[in-house]
Image (spheres, rainbow, N blue to C red):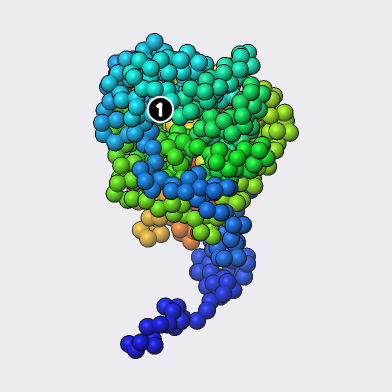
Amino acid sequence: MTAESTELPLAAAFPDADREQWQRLVEGVLRKSGVTQATGAAAEDALATDLQDGIRIRPLYTAEDGAAPVGHPGFPPFVRGGSPEGTTVAGWDVRQRHVQTDPRRANEAVLADLENGTTSVWLTVGDGGVPVAGLAEALKGVYLDLAPVVLDAGADFAPAAEELLRLYAASGVALSEAVASLGADPLGLLARTGDDSKLRVQLESAARLAGRCVAEAPGVRALTVDALPYHEAGGSAAEELGASLATGVAYLRQLTDAGLDVDDACRQLEFRYAATADQFLTIAKLRAARRLWARVAEVCGVSPEASAQRQHAVTSTVMMTRRDPWVNMLRTTVAGLSAGVGGADAVTVLPFDAALGVSDAFARRIARNTQSVLLEESHLSKVIDPAGGSWYVERLTDELARAAWAFFQDIEGAGGQAAALRSGMLADRLAATWARRSEDLARRREPITGVSEFPHLAEAPVDREPAPAPVGGGSPRTGSGGGLPRVRRDDAYERLRSRSDAHLAASGDRPKVLLAGFGPVAAHTARVAFAANLFQAGGIEPVQETVDAESAAGVFAGSGARIAVLCSSDAVYGEQAAAVAAALKSAGALRVYLAGKPGERREEFEAAGVDSFVFAGCDAVDVLSSALDVMEVA
């Protein structure tokens, strides 16, 4: 190689490509998959993915899709981070959550976590946690000058805060040196409980607490803007952000009305967001949150030095499953990674068994070690805004910020956060969003690994001590306690699996379905696998057999099943499905399904005894629920 050739750019030997060329290649791939009508931009659009909030993810982003300039880390609008150095010096704060009612047991867990990688303590106090009077015992042996304490005390935030501040003084830590978050969040409590009878008093109490912190403990934040109630009620990313902005604005008004300088008021807030296994959406959400709050701060006259949003990211409870909970380790790893990459100041990775009750020591160890791997082995904190500059991430951040700002304006137009909660406006919007998402979950357009996809019926149950009742006490699905509901992605499938478990306990067997494959093996293998996966999601055990019209009745009689699924190719269906269906019906099958869309042969198949059709995109929850009903599985 000559000296001249080494000066050529690496791409010089390759011809320039344009979007049209790429679209033509996409057209070829789509034709092979049977999509022949999509050409040009339509071919690209066929690969797009629709998210909530009206956001559409395209398969290709280029420099033409870039958003407006986002500035530099540590400077408004803080998209790239709240400080110039990001988390490169000490990493983000590894914050473990503790939910215990016994102060002694809470103390054991707190000390174990602090000795093995966590850097701060997030402690539930009062209703659902350790008593306020037990806070001293729960924090016994904790070096309060080294480990920040974060309180989650609900309606007891004022006495809990007073007790913590007393403990600082008792341990010899000057309040001027203390670092903590007292967790006052009256509007979050209203969202959880629906009880606004003491809201005004609580807001005034929170403002007094903030004033004391400003005067005596500048490193202590009095208020938390907790967006988790809106995420956990089924809200979208934009709705979570919009509600957090409305709450933050309400607190700024309260604090400044109480006499605080707007800069001091802004410094008294910490924002809490959910981190999910959708890594890019989580990254964009945290970046958009900082941008949005910077705009609010600018309008309110906050100085740039005080307007950076302090963020605490918590892995989502909505995504956590009760079945196959081990998969939660993977979900929380991705979510924790996303939170760190997105620039969160503090990250909480919930233990994999958090949905089952009080986490054991092993689960807490895995949770904290997840963050240790991300920080110490993957070195994620050593790069500031690693996703910055990605055309996709920048565009997603921009679109999410715009959608969130529109929702924030809707809340403000309804009278503000408190009014939107009182009127039900916010609850209705979140419920509508969850209803749409529930449809995607039911149709498995949003798969849940280990639950709606690849379930394991023989898994040994993971038993945990029941966790204290969460604040609010509303039904997980209806919010009957008056506050917003708490939802989980696996709710519908969990109800189905519980019916199967009850049948197993009562009879010694799970309800069964015969998967009747016929024709050549290659013709029925794919649909047998599809049907097995589908019915196991409802706790229905598949029995796989190869049949024909003559053997189907005998095979069904010996299978122990009460329903059956025809599985083969479309071509073989046309030749044999009617006869096999008739044989199964004559053998006593309560319901016969056909795996695949019926097409023009629907009437023919139904006349032969096919009752229903199962296919990719069908309402799996409805199919499985009705199957259990037919089999009289209560």
Q: Is residue 543 above or below residue 96?
A: below
Residue 19's spot in the image, x, y percent?
Answer: 58, 71
**Residue depicted at x 45% and y 33%:** 317
**Side of 574 relative to 514 (left or right):** right
Residue 109 appears in the picture as rendered: no
Query: Which residue of the protein is positioned furthest toward the top in this rendering?
Result: 133
Crowd class of label 1 (few under 14; some 14 to 19; many from 20; radius 10 Å): some
Q: In which quarter of the image is residue 520?
A: bottom left
| Residue labelled with disc 1 | 177
Identify the amino acid type marked 1: Glu
Residue 283's spot in the image, x, y percent?
Answer: 49, 47
Q: Quadrant of the N terminus?
A: bottom left
Number of numbered markers = 1
The kind of secondary structure element at disc 1 is: helix
Residue 469's spot in the image, x, y percent?
Answer: 44, 18
**Residue depicted at x 26% and y 34%:** 116
